[in-house]
Amino acid sequence: MASLTKNPNVNKWVDEMIALCKPEKVMWIDGSKEQLDALRAEAISTGEMIKLNEEKLPGCLYHRTKPNDVARVEDRTFICSRKKEDAGPTNNWCDPKEMYAKLTPMYDGVMKNRTMYIIPYSMGPIGSPLAKVGVEVTDSIYVVLNMAIMTRMGADAFKNLGDTSDDFVRGLHSKADVDPEKRYIVQFPEDNTIWSINSAYGGNVLLGKKCFALRIASYQGKNEGWMAEHMLILGIEKPNGEIKYVTAAFPSACGKTNLAMLIPPEGYTKRGYKVWTVGDDIAWLKPGPDGRLYAINPENGFFGVAPGTNEKSNFNALASTRKNTIFTNVAINNDDMTVWWEKLDKNPPVNATEWKGEKVNGPEYVAAGNKLAHPNSRFTAPAENCPCISPEFNNPQGVPISAMIFGGRRAKTAPLVYQSFNWQHGTFVGSIMASETTAAATGAVGVVRRDPMAMLPFCGYHMGDYWAHWLEMGKILGDKAPKIFNVNWFRTDENGDFIWPGYGDNMRVLDWIIERCEGAVDAVETPIGYEPKPEDINVEGLDGITTETVADLLSVDKDLWKEEAAGIEEFYKKFGEKLPKELSEELANLKARLSK
Ligand code: GTP
Ligand code: SPV
Ligand code: MN
């Protein structure tokens, strides 16, 4: 099949990959409906995908990964910069020469008897000055069908690249034998290259997502004066029709998709407030012609956590999954070929197939303490399905950002919300983020770990240099910089239950954040930053949450924070010389304020 581009850099690289992997067939993915329909039919005929109920879930497919392959594998993810110190203390590193030498034999002939699919794609709207091109070669139809949802895929992607540019990310993926012992997710930032092998799970194989749009792009952003962040983007429309845009960085499975699509409480919708979704996972940000920071969502779909998603918690996410969606590792209701996951509703299907493929009686299975869907089971849904997708979603210039929010899962320390004193202090607030781990990555769940800017698994270079880049961006933006906040929806009471209702009610906190950006509300100065007066968080219409509860949620326990400061000091030691002096200053200032 003929190449879709005249670009010699692309064609030369593709030829090399063909020579290496030795596929039986090669197929360029042009993104046409005919081609994708044929691939769907083929995947259904081999059992790789299962067709779901055509009336209830039109165009939807089901896929099950191997039980050993259900999440990102951080211990097998590498940043192979030429110099070790450029990867920094928070990344696994290996000399690129050594890594190529180790992986090349694994790819040699790996696609014999298989087809190699060559996927051109754009991260960001085609024609956007902020967009970038990638090419992924893969032996997985599942990857092709997911990339068709998650990116602008097909021949058009080459429009942005042109016939001569070399600025495209080279992604090589093979599921090989899905052997966890030989699984590698490797970024070579200086080569614009990603090699992934022996996995078929989302974040490890949809190379446009975490591997490119965060790990490679964060490195590009540092060199080119922009930022790639693990952030949702949303617009808050006020009763006067004005829309304010904010971004928020929370670690994996800590609520980005939910916040991005929130439906405000009745008191707000009645007054005319509305929330618009621009992105739910990744933001690329760059100063615009007016000096403000503009953001695009490089993705074209949502790869969202299924469990916990229901009509009440996230109506818009659920609505997004009702057509042309791929479900991975959820449960099937065999009576009508629909899908189910924990907390979708209270009725697990009787005639169920659980995520590993075993037929079970759902209610009995659940009553015995089992999960029908894997905790990191996901939906891949087109952004255009989302009822609240922003009219600016495809705007090539992006949207201007008023506030940036950090947050995580903290049972005690972090208050509901606080504002940083300024950009430098805000960078410090992002750098000290910590959160309980979730099922989005393999390993222990529920352990507090430091996860600066929610980028610990995704920063493609030295975290100290990354913080320096943040500080640099603050200088460029000056007084046009977004205001920086921190939130925590996950404080628990003595029974371990969440105190704050969360979800749509997070609008009440966004409301204060927007008012702060407009200078419309006062704040209280605390040792950690500016906090709302409890009565400035609107609790109207909330059941059991009063201004006293809010005061409690906002309390700053100085002893806990002194421990926190000691933990930060320990964490910062890792970065040695590369820790920006501004951040050690901020830590010293925090300690001083705490002991006043
Ligand atoms: P990734 O796609 O892994 O990056 O995750 P995410 O940050 O988009 O997380 P998501 O919105 O999918 O939420 C993950 C889990 O957190 C789900 O089980 C949600 O139900 C839960 N969650 C989200 N928002 C809230 C909230 O405000 N309060 C509480 N208690 N739980 C929440
Ligand atoms: C995350 O883990 O942050 C995700 C899912 O958004 S994955 O694509 O697996 O990275
Ligand atoms: Mn994510």
Image (cartoon, helix red, strand yellow):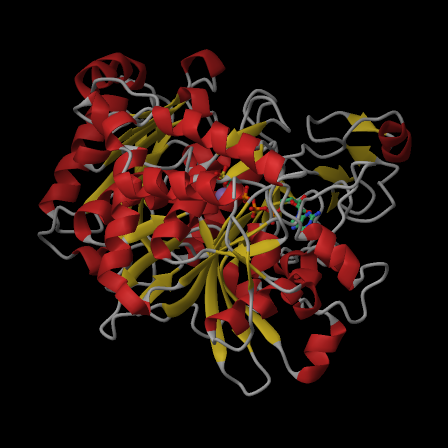
Let me know if residue 572 appears in the view: yes
- Report the residue that reaches farthest toward the bottom: 240
Q: Quadrant of the N terminus?
A: top left
Compared to 112, does 386 lie above or below? below
Residue situated in front as seen by the camera: 384 or 295: 295
Residue situated in front as seen by the camera: 233 or 196: 233
Indicate the quadrant where residue 305 lies: top right
Residue situated in front as seen by the camera: 289 or 168: 289
Question: What x and y, as percent, mark residue 384?
Answer: 52, 65
Compared to 255, does 183 lie above or below? above
Q: Is residue 566 left or right of residue 133?
A: right
Q: Is residue 328 left or right of residue 480?
A: right
* Number of numbered tags placed on the structure image: 0
- Report the residue that reaches farthest toward the front: 596
Q: Which residue lies at the image location 54% right of the left edge and 73% below the top edge?
A: 515
Let me know if residue 387 appears in the view: no
Indicate the quadrant where residue 388 lies: bottom right
Indicate the quadrant where residue 576 lies: top left
Q: Which residue lies at the image location 43% right of the left edge and 55% below the top edge?
A: 34
Residue situated in front as seen by the camera: 523 or 285: 523
Question: What x and y, as percent, mark residue 529?
Answer: 50, 54
Question: What x and y, as percent, mark residue 394?
Answer: 39, 68
Q: Which residue lies at the image location 68% right of the left edge and 55% below the top edge?
A: 57
Compared to 525, does 407 lie above or below? above
Question: What x and y, as percent, mark residue 74?
Answer: 45, 25
